[in-house]
């Protein structure tokens, strides 16, 4: 199973979560807060939370977390109103490991001084990438002249360009991903951390995290797929009794469409246009001025 969590930005930080194997877990902009984000990762959510808003991972899940937004040394902004720190993120990953919520975790962040966000990680099986080192800015890419803003960051642009060439059978490994955006393209120094990861990055395929191929386990046990007849009969009888108790349905009275279509349109009240009234007053003044002269103009007003 491959589960992915994306945190993106336009002008403010936006977030969404995506489970490639079992559907999508999406969050609206109002729901994206630091507390909600950490609760989804650690599983500390109310029992009434629907499956579409849960991170349904276990100790066999490879999780990808991609974050991008406005940030600085040791923090990333959410909605320009709150921040998540590298310590909070590191502690959340440790809770996930203790609760057996992931097998391997790939963390990618595109923000200013992005490398500071993975400095405090201490949980096993985490590989981290960042768009810039501490003290460096992460710059934007192509602007849209129509709306006057940049649409994407440089690191995100080149990572996306790289991933678009990957197919499910690709043998491209993580070392190739490390070389995606050199300083000549990103105008910053991308960094990565692999000391917590147990496998050699050259043996880790890109499709281990950026793929949706579901692992299948073969079992020799016999599983019965036939429904229980007694349960089905009791449900049928209950539904039949409910239908008997219900009142018969009636159609609402419809509008007399035929009469409405063939009736004559109502005549509108006629009112002289504004220009006509103005012209009439001008004519009266000209006739009066020509007949009596300018000295009698005061009697008009």
Image (cartoon, grey):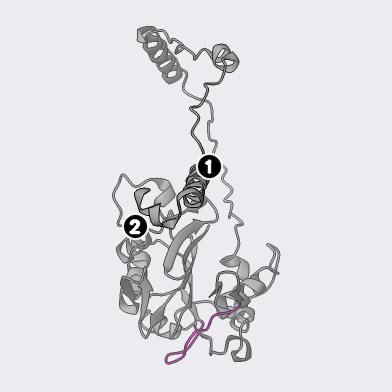
Q: Marks 2/1: CA distance?
A: 75 Å
Image position, residue 271 (x, y; %): 48, 33
Q: Secondary structure at mark 1?
A: helix
The one nearer the camera, 104 or 130, is: 130
**Residue 118 position within the rendered picture, expressed as x and y whole percent measured from the top left:** 41, 81
Callout 2–callout 1 Cβ contact below 8 Å: no
Part of the protein shown in magenta:
131-142
Mark 2 vs mark 1: in front? 1
Which residue is nearer to you in this view: 83 or 271?
271
How many numbered marks appear? 2
| Badge number at residue 20 | none
Front residue of 71/1: it is: 71
Q: Main secondary structure of the magenta part?
A: loop
Res. 57 visible in picture: no
Secondary structure beneath dot 2 equals loop
In the image, is residue 268 part of the stretch drawn in magenta?
Answer: no
Q: Which mark is residue 276?
A: 1
Looking at the rendering, which quadrant does residue 158 occupy? Answer: bottom right
Residue lying at 40% horizontally and 61% vertically, measured from the top left: 101
> Where is 63 relative to 135, above or below?
above
Q: Residues within 10 Å of mark 2 (few under 14, many from 20)?
A: some
Q: Is residue 95 left or right of residue 13?
A: left
Q: Is residue 275 left or right of residue 237?
A: right
Sequence order check, earlier mark of 2 and 1: 2
What residue sits right under mark 2 in the picture?
A: 43
* 10 Å crowding of disc 1: few (<14), some (14-19), many (20+): few
Identify the residue at horizontal 47%, vertical 87% (top origin): 137
Question: Along the line of sight, which residue is nearer the eye, 67 or 217?
Answer: 67
User: Residue 186 is drawn in which quadrant?
Assistant: bottom right
- Is the residue 78 above or below the residue 287 in the image? below
């Amino acid at each position: 199973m491959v589960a992915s969590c994306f945190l993106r930005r336009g002008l403010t930080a936006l977030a969404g979560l995506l489970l490639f194997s079992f559907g999508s877990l999406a969050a609206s902009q109002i729901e994206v807060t630091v507390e909600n984000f950490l609760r989804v990762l650690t599983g500390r959510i109310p029992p009434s939370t629907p499956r579409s808003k849960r991170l349904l991972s276990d100790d066999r899940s490879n999780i990808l977390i991609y974050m991008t937004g406005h940030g600085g040394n040791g923090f990333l902004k959410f909605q320009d109103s709150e921040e998540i720190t590298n310590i909070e993120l590191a502690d959340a990953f440790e809770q996930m490991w203790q609760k057996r919520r992931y097998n391997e975790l790939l963390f990618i962040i595109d923000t200013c001084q992005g490398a500071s966000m993975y400095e405090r990680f201490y949980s096993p099986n985490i590989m981290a990438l960042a768009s810039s080192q501490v003290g460096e800015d992460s710059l934007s890419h192509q602007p849209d002249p129509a709306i006057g803003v940049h649409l994407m960051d440089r690191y995100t642009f080149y990572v996306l360009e790289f991933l678009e060439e990957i197919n499910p059978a690709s043998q491209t490994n993580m070392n190739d991903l490390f070389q995606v955006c050199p300083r000549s393209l990103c105008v910053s120094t991308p960094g990565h951390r692999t000391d917590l990861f147990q496998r050699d990055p050259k043996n880790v395929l890109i499709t281990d995290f950026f793929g949706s191929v579901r692992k299948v386990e073969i079992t020799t046990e016999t599983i019965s797929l036939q429904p229980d007849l007694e349960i089905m009969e009791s449900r049928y009888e209950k539904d039949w009794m409910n239908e008997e108790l219900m009142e018969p349905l009636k159609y609402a009275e419809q509008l007399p469409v035929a009469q409405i279509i063939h009736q004559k349109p109502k005549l509108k009240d006629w009112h002289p246009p504004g220009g006509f009234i103005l012209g009439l007053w001008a004519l009266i003044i000209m006739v009066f001025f020509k007949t009596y002269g300018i000295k009698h103009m005061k009697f008009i007003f």
